Amino acid sequence: MKTAIVHDWFTIYMGSEKCVESFNNLFPESDIFTIADFLQSPEERKIILNNKKPFTSFIQNLPLASKFHRHYFPLFPFAVEQLDISGYELIISSSHAFAKGVLSNANQLHICYCHTPIRYAWDLYHQYINESGLNKGLKGLIAKYALHKIRMWDLSTANRVDYFIANSSHVAKRIKKIYNRDAEVIFPPVDTDLFKCVSEKDDYYLIISRFVPYKKVDLVVEAFSKMPDKKLLVVGSGPDEKKIKNLASSNIEILGHQNQNELIKLIQKAKAFVFAAEEDFGITIVEAQSCGTPVIAYKIGGASETVIDGKTGILFSEQTAESVIQAVKNFEDSNLYAPDLISRHASIFSRKTFEQNISNFIQEKYSVFKR
């Protein structure tokens, strides 16, 4: 099969890029297409792309695109349609926004691994508009209209995909709701081999996240500010950094960005990993469990599929500081969490399992396609 891998954009090594890494492992002769490639780290380029140079759209060459490419998002539907994949038999799109809209024909098999339908255009639309200050004025009106047009385009492109794969049952429900398409659930790859179990824990809680509104880092910081006897380490950066620092009390340390080796050590020694966002899947939640570290997480979203409540962690039901505080109390009162058991549970989400499941799915659908 002559194979094209299509990804939204490359800027950093995160969960969706881990999937591209695996697709590249499975199809080493494939070509890679993307709206824009601004991946800076040579090490990350080697890991994700195997040093291949992706084919990019005109967005790549627009003024200041390397820093502000997301400001061109109204052009992204048009840009992805300019990627010429007409010479490929198999198309694998890794899509959390626009990649699934690439143009294909009846002689091509298009399988989309959907991380989520476009969150800021659909389920997080009103939150995005309000928190971005776009709920009034001319700028807000333009943004609302642009997102309206993107919703129309996004819905119209659902039938360009032959088969959807969702990264969780939570996302599969959204795919069904928005696109009226069924999706096979294959959990994304987690490098569980890198996150070795450590039984001896230190006396601190940990959160690792981008500092953006829907990640609810501010909520966790607010909760621990009301628990001065409990230490919280916060790893990450982003637009909400000033807000989060202002909320932090003396028992909370904002560590900023950390390299992977430091992250692993922090996760391994944490008393528990805390996460308050409604996440599509939540790779860091699984990485924590792989280290034998229990998880305290919001139960709506991917966490409900990866954390066994009462065995590998605690799930709380509301995104409030009070709910986090109660979950921490319940966690400390239980004292029942065995690191070895937690780590064994996480092993079912390994990269090896992901690649085997993806390979089986593609081979099955390709054999039907070729009949």
Image (cartoon, rainbow, N blue to C red):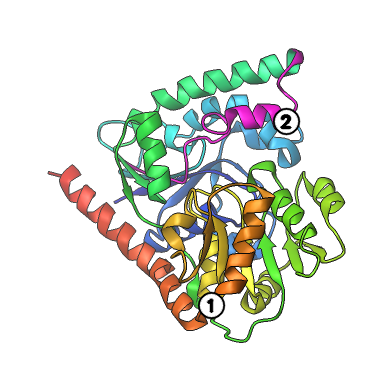
Res 292 label: 1
Nearer to me, 18 or 324: 324
Q: Residues within 10 Å of mark 1 (few under 14, many from 20)?
A: many
Q: Is residue 173 magenta?
A: no
Residue at 38% in and 58% down:
27
Q: Can the viewer see residue 221 in this picture?
A: yes
Residues drawn in magenta: 109-137
Can you give x and y, in whole percent of width and height, for residue 72 in the image?
Answer: 66, 29
Task: Give the structural element (helix, strand or loop) at label 2.
Answer: loop
Which quarter shows the C terminus? top left
Can you give x and y, in whole percent of width and height, for residue 90 in the image?
Answer: 32, 45
Residue type pointed to by label 1: Gly
Q: Note whether 312 is above or below 324 in the view shown.
A: below
Residue type pointed to by label 2: Ser
Residue at 84% in and 53% down:
245
Residue 134 lies left or right of residue 58; in this view the side is right
Nearer to me, 56 or 190: 190
Image quadrant where residue 272 sits: bottom right
Image quadrant where residue 349 sits: bottom left
Residue 137 lies left or right of residue 96; in this view the side is right
Res 345 label: none
Distance from label 2 to label 1 (Cα)?
A: 38 Å
Can you give x and y, in whole percent of width and height, for residue 213 in the image?
Answer: 69, 42
Residue at 81% in and 65% down:
228
Q: Note whether 344 is above or below 299 in the view shown.
A: below
Answer with mark 2 or mark 1, whichever residue precedes in sequence.
2
Circle 2 is placed at which residue position?
A: 132
Q: Residue furthest front?
A: 333
